[in-house]
C-alpha cells in the first residue's frame, strides 16, 4: 500500500476528495464505495467544494454496510447517514445510491441481491474505508474469511462499544449488520483506507504490515494491487 501521512483530518479529506473529483470528471458515471462512521466525514465535507459545478447526475454509490434491526428512518441507520452526509449535501441522485438491503424481509437473499446490484453497476471504482479498533473493514469482524461476500455479521462487543457514541446508550446499538464481505471489498478498483488518532494505530499497523490474518480483517488490503492508506501521525505511529 501507498501510505500517505497527513497533518490532520482536513488535509486527508482534501486529498481524497481531489482524487474522487478527478475520477468523476473523467468518468461521470463513476461508482463510489461509501463508508460511514466518523472517519470519512472530512472526505464528504471536502467533496462539497471540490465537486461544485461538476455534473453528478450519473454518479453511483454503494454503502459498505448497514445495521440490521434498526429502523430505516432511525438517524443512525446507514441509509440515513449516507443520505444526510453524502446524497443531500452533494446533490447526488438518491436512486443511484444504495445501502445494503438490511430491511428486506428476505434477509437471507439480501447479500446476493446487493452483490448483483454492484456487479450490474460495473463494480466499484473507488472504495473508501475506515478501520475498526479491532481491525475490521466494513463490518468484517475478526474471523471473517478473505473470500467473504455480502452477508449478515454479528458485531463484536468492542465495535458496539466504539459505536455507542452515536446512540443514547449501548443497548440501542444493533447487534447485527449486513456488510460487504472482504472478497467484495477486494474487487473494487482502488481502496482508500483512512484512519485518524492513536486508537487506530495498532489496527493500521496490522492492516498495512502485519501478517495476513482473518484475526485482523484489514490485513486483506495487502492482497489488493491498488491501495492508498491516508493516516495522521497518531494513526501512523505503530508503522515500522
Ligand atoms: C463503516 C464501516 C466501519 C468503520 C469503522 C471505523 O461503514 O464500515 O468499518 O469504518 O468502524 O469507524 P469510525 O470511522 O467511526 O472510527
Image: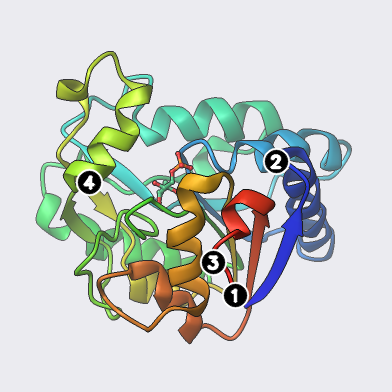
| Label at residue 240 | 1
- Could you give the CA–CA distance between mark 3 and mark 2, rounded to whole angstroms? 24 Å
Tell me if mark 3 has few (under 14), some (14-19) or many (20+) residues whose alpha carbon lies within 10 angstroms of its own: many
Give the residue drawn at x 36%, y 83%: 212
- Could you give the CA–CA distance between mark 4 and mark 1, rounded to whole angstroms? 34 Å
Q: Residue 123 or 169: which is nearer the viewer?
A: 169
Instruction: From the image, state whether disc 3 or disc 1 is nearer to you.
Output: 1
Q: Earlier in the sequence, mark 1 or mark 2?
A: 2
Disc 4 on helix, strand or loop? strand
Instruction: Name the side, left or right, on which 61 lies relative to 42.
Output: left
Disc 3 on helix, strand or loop? loop
Q: Residue 199 or 190: which is nearer the viewer?
A: 199
Give the residue drawn at x 70%, y 41%: 9
Q: Earlier in the sequence, mark 3 or mark 1?
A: 3
- Could you give the CA–CA distance between mark 3 and mark 1, rounded to whole angstroms? 31 Å
Disc 2 on helix, strand or loop? helix
Instruction: From the image, state whether disc 4 or disc 2 is nearer to you.
Output: 2
| Label at residue 177 | 4
Instruction: Name the side, left or right, on which 149 lies relative to 21.
Output: left
Disc 1 on helix, strand or loop? loop
Amino acid at each position: 500500500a501507498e501510505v500517505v501521512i497527513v497533518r490532520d483530518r482536513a488535509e486527508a479529506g482534501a486529498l481524497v476528495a481531489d482524487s474522487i473529483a478527478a475520477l468523476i470528471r473523467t468518468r461521470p458515471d463513476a461508482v463510489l464505495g461509501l463508508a460511514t462512521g466518523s472517519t470519512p466525514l472530512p472526505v464528504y465535507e471536502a467533496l462539497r467544494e471540490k465537486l461544485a459545478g461538476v455534473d453528478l447526475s450519473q454518479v453511483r454509490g454503494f454503502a459498505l454496510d448497514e445495521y440490521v434491526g434498526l429502523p430505516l428512518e432511525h438517524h443512525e441507520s446507514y441509509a440515513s447517514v449516507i443520505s444526510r452526509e453524502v446524497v443531500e449535501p452533494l446533490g447526488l441522485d438518491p436512486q443511484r445510491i444504495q445501502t445494503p438491503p438490511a430491511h428486506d424481509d428476505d434477509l437471507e437473499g439480501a447479500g446476493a441481491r446487493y452483490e448483483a446490484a454492484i456487479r450490474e453497476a460495473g463494480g466499484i471504482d473507488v472504495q473508501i474505508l475506515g478501520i475498526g479498533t479491532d481491525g475490521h473493514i466494513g463490518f468484517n469482524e475478526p474471523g471473517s474469511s478473505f473470500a467473504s461476500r455480502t452477508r449478515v455479521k454479528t458485531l463484536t462487543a468492542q465495535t458496539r462499544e466504539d459505536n455507542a457514541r452515536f446512540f443514547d446508550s449501548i443497548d440501542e446499538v444493533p447487534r447485527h449488520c449486513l456488510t460487504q464481505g472482504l472478497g467484495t471489498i477486494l474487487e473494487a478498483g482502488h481502496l482508500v483506507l483512512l484512519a485518524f488518532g492513536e486508537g487506530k494505530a495498532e489496527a493500521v499497523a496490522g492492516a498495512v504490515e502485519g501478517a495476513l490474518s482473518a484475526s485482523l480483517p484489514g490485513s486483506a488490503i495487502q492482497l489488493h494491487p491498488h491501495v492508498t492508506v491516508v493516516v495522521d501521525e497518531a494513526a501512523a505511529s505503530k508503522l515500522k
